């Protein structure tokens, strides 16, 4: 009896030591990654701000977009990383496998070139790739095994995202939930949160501005709640439309231009032509000034969201770099501002609703979008934001920006579907019958 008690005590002591050892390892990892991503993220943010200001003061730079595209293709082919992007970073988390260190200078330079010459793009794809690469190689330097290296990769993704947007909680939860929708990677949350907070604080001290908006939120009422619900459903459909537009543009380019140099040059020429027709550069770059105008001033043209969808699809699917999430913010804010006003919702508040709901719709991240609303707009109006994010998530269907993303559960029924995001699904085919089965019920390894 005494021997059994001694064995049990020894097991508890051994378990406690292992647990504490892992916790300390994650703390050390998060500090190293947080510092690295905070410094690199601040440098990246300042670089994008500089090239954007340069383009805005020298409008003729947009004429160099095809040349910038040719250089981007040359860089990626020269570095032998053509076709490598955010989906491959997600795959490295799920399946294992190393990331190429040379991806970092390539995505940094290519994103800067895209913004300098007026391509319609964001910055989060670069953030996820840069952060994931940093995390992966830091984990390797610390001699982590493959499982822990995956956690390090995700921690880097979250930290870099937080450094760019100043939203550490959103960043950690986003990375923990976006790869497999419906499954939370809990082991990543502690190092991811520590690293994200540290990275965002370092970037802020180095001059990076967090994304924050002060808005007036109406009191909660049944009448306004119903109108917000209508807006949220519409934003979900707009989310699906945005993803479909990216898919259609990609298929069109594939059919017409097999040569990547011709493809990117033609895409650049299309963006230039559309910019000249528009008569302004509101749809080029990230468009943060337009987002601010919609949210803070309640001003948006009814066609702004549609043109941003077109500009972004032509830019990103041609081969330019940056990301689609900031354009999703733009699309949501401008659509929400215009359509919400028709519903009698205060324009700035409706723009804020659109900002978070289209983000949640294109990324299939409901909880993350609710947290984003709190970090960006404060806690006021949480019931409105929460119900809006839920409805947009459902009505966006099973479309999504990331083809490596797996949706674990149905959005409409209590059933497991284990399906990859289907970029070929039409908007009127949302439902379990349209979702292909991608993995067995008991499998722990998602099929990609």
Image: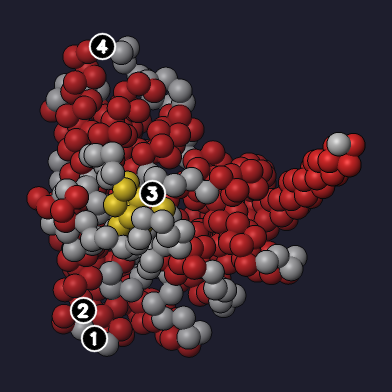
| Pointer 4 or 2: first along the chain | 4
Report, in whole angstroms, how far the alpha carbon at label 3 lies from the one at label 1.
Answer: 33 Å
Q: Which mark is residue 181?
A: 3
Q: CA distance from mark 3 to mark 2?
A: 29 Å
Q: Residue at x 18, y 44 (%)?
A: 237
Q: Nearer the viewer, residue 257 or 362?
A: 362
Residue at numbered disc 4: 221
Q: CA distance from mark 3 to mark 4?
A: 32 Å
How many angstroms separate mark 4 from mark 2 (CA)?
49 Å
From the viewer's side, name the closer residue of 289 and 405. 405
Rendered image: mark on residue 250: none
Q: Position of residue 402 (x, y in %)?
A: 35, 60
Residue 64, compared with residue 290, is above or below; it is below
Whichever of labels 3 and 2 marks the residue nearer the N terminus, that label is 3
Q: Which residue is mark 1?
A: 258
Query: Quick one: SS at disc 4?
Result: loop
Look at the numbered discs 2 and 1 and tell me whether their residues touch, using CB distance below 8 Å.
yes
Which comes before the other along the chain, label 3 or label 1? 3
Residue 150 image position (x, y, % from top left): 58, 61
Residue in the foreground of this view, choosing between 390 and 336: 390
Q: Residues within 10 Å of mark 1 (few under 14, many from 20)?
A: few
What residue does disc 2 label?
A: 254
Mark 4 surroundings within 10 Å by alpha-carbon count, few (fewer than 14), some (14 through 19), many (20 or more): few
The answer to whether the residue labelled 3 contacts the one labelled 2, judged by CB atoms less than 8 Å apart, is no
Question: Residue 401's x, y, as percent?
Answer: 32, 57
Residue density around tag 2, few if under 14, some if 14–19, many if 20 or more, within 10 Å? some
Is residue 112 found left or right of 286 in the rendered image? right
- Tell me the crowding category of disc 3: few under 14, some 14 to 19, or many 20 or more residues within 10 angstroms, Cα based: many
Q: CA distance from mark 4 to mark 1?
A: 55 Å
Position of 220 with respect to 26 (left or right) is left
Is label 4 in contact with label 1 (beta carbons under 8 Å)?
A: no
């Amino acid at each position: 009896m005494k021997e059994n008690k001694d064995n049990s005590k020894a097991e508890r002591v051994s378990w406690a030591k292992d647990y504490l050892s892992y916790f300390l390892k994650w703390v050390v990892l998060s500090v190293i990654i947080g510092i690295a991503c905070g410094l690199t993220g601040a440098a990246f943010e300042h670089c994008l701000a500089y090239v954007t200001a340069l383009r805005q003061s020298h409008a003729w730079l947009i004429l160099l977009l095809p040349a910038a595209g040719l250089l981007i293709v040359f860089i990626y082919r020269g570095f032998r990383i053509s076709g490598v992007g955010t989906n491959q970073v997600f795959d490295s988390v799920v399946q294992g496998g190393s990331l190429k260190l040379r991806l970092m200078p390539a995505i940094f330079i290519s994103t800067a070139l895209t913004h300098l010459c007026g391509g319609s793009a964001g910055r989060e794809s670069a953030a996820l790739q840069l952060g994931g690469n940093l995390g992966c190689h830091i984990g390797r330097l610390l001699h982590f095994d493959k499982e822990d290296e995956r956690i390090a990769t995700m921690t880097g993704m979250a930290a870099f995202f937080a450094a760019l947007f100043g939203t550490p909680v959103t960043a950690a939860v986003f990375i923990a939930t976006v790869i497999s929708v419906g499954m939370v990677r809990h082991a990543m949350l502690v190092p991811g949160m520590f690293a994200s907070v540290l990275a965002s604080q370092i970037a802020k001290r180095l001059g990076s501005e967090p994304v924050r908006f002060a808005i007036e939120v109406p009191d909660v009422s049944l009448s306004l709640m119903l109108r917000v619900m209508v807006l949220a459903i519409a934003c979900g459909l707009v989310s699906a439309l945005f993803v479909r537009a990216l898919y259609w543009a990609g298929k069109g380019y594939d059919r017409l231009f097999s040569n990547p140099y011709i493809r990117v040059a033609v895409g650049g020429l299309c963006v230039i032509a559309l910019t000249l027709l528009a008569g302004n550069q509101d749809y080029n770059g990230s468009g943060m000034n337009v987002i601010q105008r919609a949210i803070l001033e309640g001003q948006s043209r009814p066609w702004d969201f549609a043109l941003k969808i077109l500009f972004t699809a032509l830019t990103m699917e041609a081969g330019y770099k940056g990301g689609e999430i900031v354009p999703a913010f733009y699309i949501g804010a401008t659509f929400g501002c215009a359509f919400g006003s028709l519903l009698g919702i205060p324009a700035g508040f409706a723009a804020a609703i659109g900002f978070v709901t289209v983000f949640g719709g294109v990324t299939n991240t409901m909880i993350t979008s609710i947290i984003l609303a709190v970090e960006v707009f404060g806690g006021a109006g949480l019931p409105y934001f929460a119900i809006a994010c839920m409805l947009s998530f459902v009505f966006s269907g099973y479309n999504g920006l990331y083809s490596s993303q797996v949706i674990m559960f149905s959005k409409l029924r209590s059933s497991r579907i284990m399906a990859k995001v289907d970029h070929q699904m039409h908007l009127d085919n949302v439902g379990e019958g349209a979702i292909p089965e991608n993995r067995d019920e008991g499998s722990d390894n998602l099929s990609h």
